[in-house]
Image: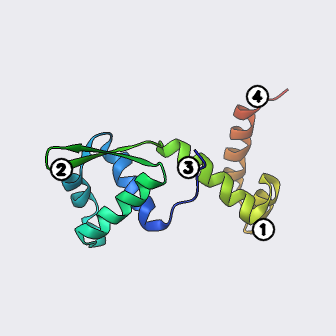
Amino acid sequence: MNMKRLPDAELEVMKALWASGPDTLRSALEEDLEPFHWAITTINTYLTRLADKGFVHIRREGRSNRYTPLVSREEYQAFDSRAVLDRLYGSPRNFLAALAQDGLGRDELAELQDLLDQLSGGRE
């Protein structure tokens, strides 16, 4: 699948689906998305777009539909993080340099060092 960044509204629908899990009824999604005050037709439009993009599987069951995410939250976060990094900073080094300009505290630097150590298999 050629993944693309989702608009904010579609991402909110995906977040609700990820929280609900597979085979979610639209009524459950409507309840989770109620704070946005979207019309049912708007939610249907977002779900159809997500299905067309390969993010959601729609299964008809009787008179209702069930929705299953085809992309996990972790897969999308990894993709989106890399897309933001590439688009705005070009490299992880440039991203960290931008963070450092804003002033990273000693604790934040220690957390980053711990993460780098874990990712590289520990210090030599």
Point out the tag, 3 or 2, that comes first from the N-terminus: 2
Residue 101, which numbered label?
Answer: 1
| Rendered position, 70 above or below 102 | above
Please say if the residues under marks 3 and 2 sit with CB atoms less than 8 Å apart. no
Q: Distance between the Cα atoms at labels 1 and 4?
A: 27 Å
Locate the N terminus and report the quarter of the image it occupies: top right
**Amino acid type for the residue under numbered disc 4:** Gly
Q: Residues within 10 Å of mark 3 (few under 14, many from 20)?
A: few
Point out the tag, 2 or 4, that comes first from the N-terminus: 2
Residue 64, which numbered label?
Answer: 2
The residue at which mark 4 appears reads as 122
Q: Secondary structure at mark 1?
A: helix
| Residue occupying image coordinates x 80% and y 59% | 90
The answer to whether 115 appears left or right of 62 in the picture is right
Point out the tag, 1 or 4, that comes first from the N-terminus: 1
| Residue occupying image coordinates x 54% and y 48% | 76
| Rendered position, 81 above or below 101 | above
Q: Secondary structure at mark 3?
A: helix
Locate the C terminus and report the quarter of the image it occupies: top right
- Image coordinates for residue 104, horizontal then vertical, percent: 71, 60
The answer to whether 87 appears left or right of 25 in the picture is right
Please say if the residues under marks 1 and 3 sit with CB atoms less than 8 Å apart. no
Q: Distance between the Cα atoms at labels 3 and 2?
A: 30 Å
